[in-house]
Image (cartoon, rainbow, N blue to C red):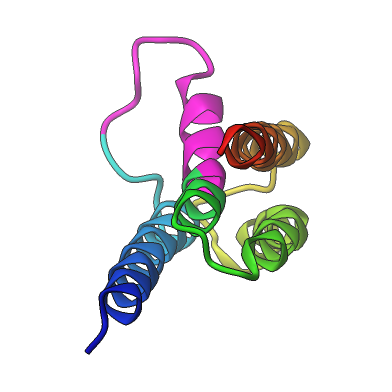
Amino acid sequence: MSLSTDRRGRVRCALAAVVVVQFIVLYAPEAPGPPSPIPHADKAVHALVFALPVLIAGLGRLRRWRLVALLCAAHAPLSEVVQHLALGQRSGDPWDVVADLVGVGAASIGVLLTLRRR
């Protein structure tokens, strides 16, 4: 196994792991963890779970990192619709979609700036 194949495999495993975490955060029947004493802390969590896949794919130099960003952007509104319609203890929140898209956008800009420097 070559070094680049090994690196790609590790990047893909990390990407899969953060997507699993994203799905747990978004689709658990109830919001995971106790309520935060910090107002709107859930928005930061949303931004983070949508930024991480883009960062891992982009900084891990997967050729199709932009596709990962596009899929994350498409998943943002879909996840809120699913929460609203299918998860009784959860509700769809348009501001969560905004936070998700901010995470995708910020991560994409960060990847582009980092790759440009290299």
- Which residue is at a point 70% across and 53% down the rendered structure image? 76
Magenta stretch, residue numbers: 34-51
Q: Main secondary structure of the magenta part?
A: helix
Relative to 67, residue 43 above or below: above
State which quadrant residue 19 falls in: bottom left
Most distant residue in the top direction: 38
Residue 41, given in percent of the width and then of the height, sits at 46, 20
Q: Quadrant of the C terminus?
A: top right
- Which residue is at a point 34% across and 11% down the rendered structure image? 37
Relative to 36, residue 19 above or below: below
Of 97 and 59, the residue lying toward us: 59
State which quadrant residue 20 falls in: bottom left
Residue 93, given in percent of the width and then of the height, sits at 70, 39
Of 21 and 8, the residue lying toward us: 8
Tell how many labels: 0
Q: Quadrant of the N terminus?
A: bottom left
Of 1 and 44, the residue lying toward us: 1
Relative to 30, residue 35 above or below: above
Residue 66, given in percent of the width and then of the height, sits at 71, 60
Residue 118 sits inside the magenta stretch:
no
- Which residue is at a point 77% across and 38% down the rendered structure image? 94
- Which residue is at a point 67% across and 42% down the rendered structure image? 108
State which quadrant residue 106 falls in: top right
Residue 49 sits inside the magenta stretch:
yes
Relative to 35, residue 15 above or below: below
Residue 46, given in percent of the width and then of the height, sits at 54, 38
